[in-house]
């Protein structure tokens, strides 16, 4: 039995009147059960130097379907202090609908049910080199 755990920790001392300190951990499990997720694509890295929209993660209906559990991790590994990171980002899209933007150093982790036509696409905002790393955990 596989045990894969995700942990997130949020802290801030100056965004509100009082300090924020939230930490949560959870085992990644298959749909509707307490059995651990057993599969992963492995950590992959990809370099982009175009503003064209491209598929980053494509799902095969026979591997990941709407009734199975999957989690996706994506990180924009660019973190160059000499580059205006506030203007350079990568759009994350599903069915050509933007679900968010990852600026240099930003990352995301989300549940996802893949299916036909629901690939995860990316569209860099710049022709400068952008490096992404990504991984899918699934049953």
Image (spheres, rainbow, N blue to C red):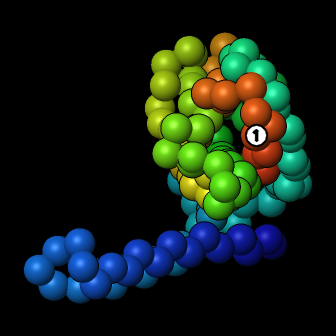
- Where disc 1 sits, the SS reads strand
Task: Where is residue 28? Give x, y as percent.
Answer: 63, 64
Front position in the image: 43 or 124: 124
Front position in the image: 117 or 36: 117
Crowding near the residue tagged with mark 1, few <14, some 14–19, many ≥20 C-alpha atoms within 10 Å: many
Q: Is residue 127 left or right of residue 18?
A: right
Residue at 74 percent of width and 26 percent of height: 127
Task: Where is residue 116? Give x, y as percent.
Answer: 69, 16
Question: Relative to 86, is 54 above or below?
Answer: above
Front position in the image: 31 or 75: 75
Q: How many numbered marks, from 0 up? A: 1
Determine if residue 97 is in view: yes
Q: Quadrant of the N terminus?
A: bottom right
Residue at 80 percent of width and 37 percent of height: 129
In the displayed orientation, state which residue is furthest to the left.
17
Determine if residue 67 is in view: no
Task: Where is residue 75? Give x, y as percent.
Answer: 68, 52
Residue at 79 percent of width and 45 percent of height: 131
Question: Relative to 80, is 18 above or below?
Answer: below
Front position in the image: 89 or 97: 89
Q: Quadrant of residue 26?
A: bottom right
Task: Where is residue 83? Give x, y as percent.
Answer: 64, 49
Residue at 57 percent of width and 48 percent of height: 85
Q: Quadrant of residue 112?
A: top right
Residue underneath mark 1: 130
């Amino acid at each position: 039995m596989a045990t894969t755990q995700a942990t997130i920790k949020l802290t801030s001392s100056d965004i509100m009147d009082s300090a924020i300190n939230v930490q949560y951990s959870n085992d990644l499990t298959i749909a509707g059960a307490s059995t651990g997720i057993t599969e992963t694509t492995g950590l992959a890295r990809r370099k982009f130097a175009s503003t064209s929209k491209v598929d980053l993660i494509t799902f095969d209906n026979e591997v990941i379907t709407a009734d199975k559990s999957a989690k996706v991790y994506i990180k924009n590994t660019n973190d160059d202090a000499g580059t205006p990171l506030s203007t350079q980002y990568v759009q994350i899209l599903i069915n050509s609908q933007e679900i968010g933007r990852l600026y240099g150093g930003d990352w995301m982790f989300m549940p996802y049910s893949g299916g036909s036509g629901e690939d995860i696409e990316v569209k860099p905002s710049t022709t400068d080199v952008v490096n992404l790393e990504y991984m899918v955990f699934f049953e």
